[in-house]
Amino acid sequence: MSEYFTIPEIKYEGPASTNPFSFKYYNKDEIIAGKTMAEHLRFSMCYWHTLCADGTDMFGIGTIDKSFGATDPIEIYKQKVYAGFEMMNKLGIEYFCFHDRDIAPEGASLADFQKNLDIIVPIIKEQMEKYGIKLLWGTANCFSRARYMHGAATSPYADAFAYAAAQIKKAIDITIELGGKGYVFWGGREGYETLLNTDMALENDNYARMLKLAVSYARSKGFDGDFYIEPKPKEPTKHQYDFDSATVLGFLFKYGLLDDFKLNIEANHATLAGHTFEHELRICRINGILGSVDANQGDNHLGWDTDQFPTNIYDTTYAMYEILKAGGFKYGGLNFDAKTRRGSNTMEDIFLAHIAGMDAFALGLRNAVKLIEDGRIDKFIEERYSSYASGIGKDIVDGKATLESLSDYALSLTEDVKPESGRQEYLESIVNSVIFS
Ligand code: XUL
Ligand code: CO
């Protein structure tokens, strides 16, 4: 098979290198905090942006050709496989993620689509074996086609629910066939445009029904990985039910789904929900539901999901801090759900973007380890809450205090409560001094 890219394998050359096709911070075999950088970061290429998206936007047509020299639909998707695996191999990316619709042409019917998937999946499998690349997670695209214009699992139309079930069943089969340990639900159309036409209770119940059907099918076929819900508050729908981590946690709890589901946190979805990336990760960390991450970033001046490659070092540092504190990934990883800007329209740009993203997270990992080893932030927090380690605070934590005993205690205080400074600016300066030391 001839090469698609004249770019060589990307190697670590260190921060002083000016070679654009080299890593400055990502040194995959270097051991940091007990694991190699590759084991910590578990980078993944996303099939849809990298091998399918052609730069089309609301105002303009594509600017980059992703047909890889082919014209026949099946042939185009075969070439995507070869090109994608060559790219991952050259970048040293060990995982990938896909939607059913990214990997094969849909054809004229559901049966055609499944036939096309059956042609492409063995080629993917062969390339995975050739390069030692693994599947991070699979999913079904139940949002692009007109049949899903009012939702898939939450559609008012039972036939749409059934059609989505067929896609999910097949996507689970493929995920299992390819040895994936994750299966994602992103509910782009699982929400509403107006409450005036919406039976929210039924839609929520049906969404949970679909998730349960998927779990019971996948488990019956031997899938022992994790299911992930990927929160996003809006876009394309005005309001999406999987609004943010806290909302999804409540949903999973209500429907008894917490044994099988974790969350896939996307940075740009966090900011769309009005949160920071690290806030969403913290919610997952403290509730034991961190599954995987869609690594990208938004633009502060734009109100939509720009899916940019992550280059903001503060974001990657705080994200890796949360991920390390959560004990790292089990089956998840850092999936670049990111696309080059429409004007960065060459294949070189796609390599450079992945290098930038991988280096940004590598530097984030290095910084986060330094922050944890430095210990001043942990110590500050411990001291800030030390009133709960003894006396009345310990009684509260141990469940020994009652409202009456607390009232008696408060009445006995001779002075008003005097909280100490939260020292935010000082803590931010610690972060800077650790990052730039
Ligand atoms: C859309 C998005 C999806 C999911 C998978 O915003 O993030 O690509 O990651 O369906
Ligand atoms: Co995503």
Image (cartoon, rainbow, N blue to C red):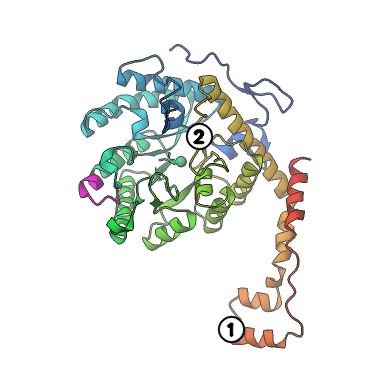
Q: Which mark is residue 216?
A: none
Q: Position of residue 275 (x, y in %)?
A: 55, 52
- Position of residue 134 relative to residue 407, above or below, is above
Say whether residue 396 is left or right of residue 236: right
Q: Residue at x 32, y 48 (%)?
A: 214
Query: Which one is in front, 406 or 397?
Result: 406
- Position of residue 348 relative to residue 361, above or below, is above
Which quadrant is the N terminus positioned in?
A: top left
Question: Which element type, helix, strand or loop, lies under badge 2?
Answer: loop
Which quadrant is the C terminus positioned in?
A: top right
Query: Which one is in front, 216 or 434?
Result: 434
Q: Which residue is the site of mark 1?
A: 402
Q: Position of residue 6 (x, y in %)?
A: 54, 13
Tag 2: amino acid: Ala
Task: Write down the region rendered in magenta.
Answer: 153-162
Ligand 1, by image quadrant, is top left
Say whether residue 416 is left or right of residue 134: right
Question: Which element type, helix, strand or loop, lies under badge 1?
Answer: loop
